[in-house]
Image (spheres, rainbow, N blue to C red):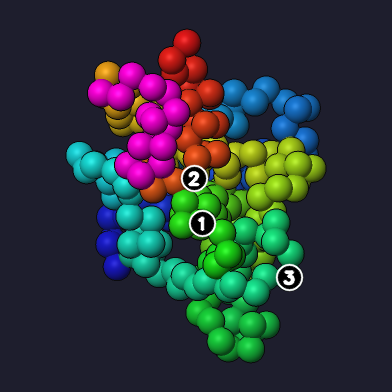
Amino acid sequence: MNNKLEQKILDLKKEYQQDKYHNSDKNIDDIDKNVIIDQANKVSNEVLNVFFKDEEPPLKIASLMKKLGFDLFKNSQFPQKELSGLLALNLKEKLAGKYSNRVIIVNGQDSIGHQRFTIAHELAHYIFDAIEDKEYYEAYYRTDEENTKKIKEYRANKFAANLLMPEDIFRRKYYELLKEYKDTDLVKNALTVVFKVSYTAVNYRIDELELGL
């Protein structure tokens, strides 16, 4: 296990256990969204500086999680198609001993890009919302609009976006590709390959970074 990376994550977890938005189900529309966006970007950048410094995309999310002691599984028979993944911590006995104490299960019917986003999303919950050594369970419903209005879900999505598509790198790649292709649709498709994310995630990232305006 990467001691430096593990210690960084543990330090971040400890810091945000004291945060007033820890594991919060409150509606994001009731607060200043920029507070949560800043948290997501700050923490994802700290993780990137330890694990991904000076590297080119795509970020190796599976390798990152394995260094943190997570077991990753795919399940192609999720009962609900909109369910993208599950995070289970310290639930080994309840899972009949089949898994370890740190588990993420993704929907195998999703694209690889969606699966990678789901893993990054669940890592955010591990850092921001779960308490070390206590039982924690989280289900990520990608298309559940009501659920994504929760502060913790909104923050997890912002964290995942910046982890997989770091702002500085994404901006640079966007304008490099735009210069090469001179067509935004071609650029978007190319970015899905470069960052190994979904077309939807690329679209959201371009919009939130106000690229091409």
Of labels 2 and 3, earlier in sequence is 3
Given contact means CB atoms under 8 Å apart, are the residues at marks 3 and 1 in contact?
no
- CA distance separating discs 2 and 3: 22 Å
Examine the structure image and report whether residue 182 is included in the region drawn in magenta. Answer: yes
Residue at point 53%, 23% (across, down) = 207
Task: Kindly identify the amino acid type of the residue bearing the numbered disc 3.
Answer: Pro
Q: Nearer the viewer, residue 107 or 121?
A: 107
Q: Quadrant of residue 89?
A: bottom right
Examine the structure image and report whether residue 112 is included in the region drawn in magenta. Answer: no
| Percent position of residue 209, x then y | 47, 22
| Percent position of residue 188, x then y | 43, 32
- CA distance separating discs 3 and 1: 17 Å
Mark 2 = which residue?
198
- Write down the region rendered in magenta: 180-194
Q: Is residue 82 visible?
A: yes
Q: Nearer the viewer, residue 74 or 62?
A: 74
Given contact means CB atoms under 8 Å apart, are the residues at marks 1 and 2 in contact?
yes
Of labels 3 and 1, earlier in sequence is 3
Count residues near mark 1 (Cα–Cα under 10 Å), then give few for <14, some for 14-19, many for 20+. few
Task: Kindly identify the amino acid type of the residue bearing the numbered disc 1.
Answer: Ser
Residue at point 35%, 58% (across, down) = 64
Under circle 1, the secondary element is: loop
Mark 3 = which residue?
79
| Percent position of residue 103, x then y | 53, 71
Under circle 2, the secondary element is: loop
Mark 1 = which residue?
111
Count residues near mark 2 (Cα–Cα under 10 Å), then give few for <14, some for 14-19, many for 20+. many
Residue at point 37%, 67% (across, down) = 66
Q: Quadrant of residue 10?
A: bottom left
Q: Is residue 191 left or right of residue 87?
A: left
Q: Mark 3 or mark 1, which is nearer to you?
A: 1
Of labels 1 and 2, earlier in sequence is 1
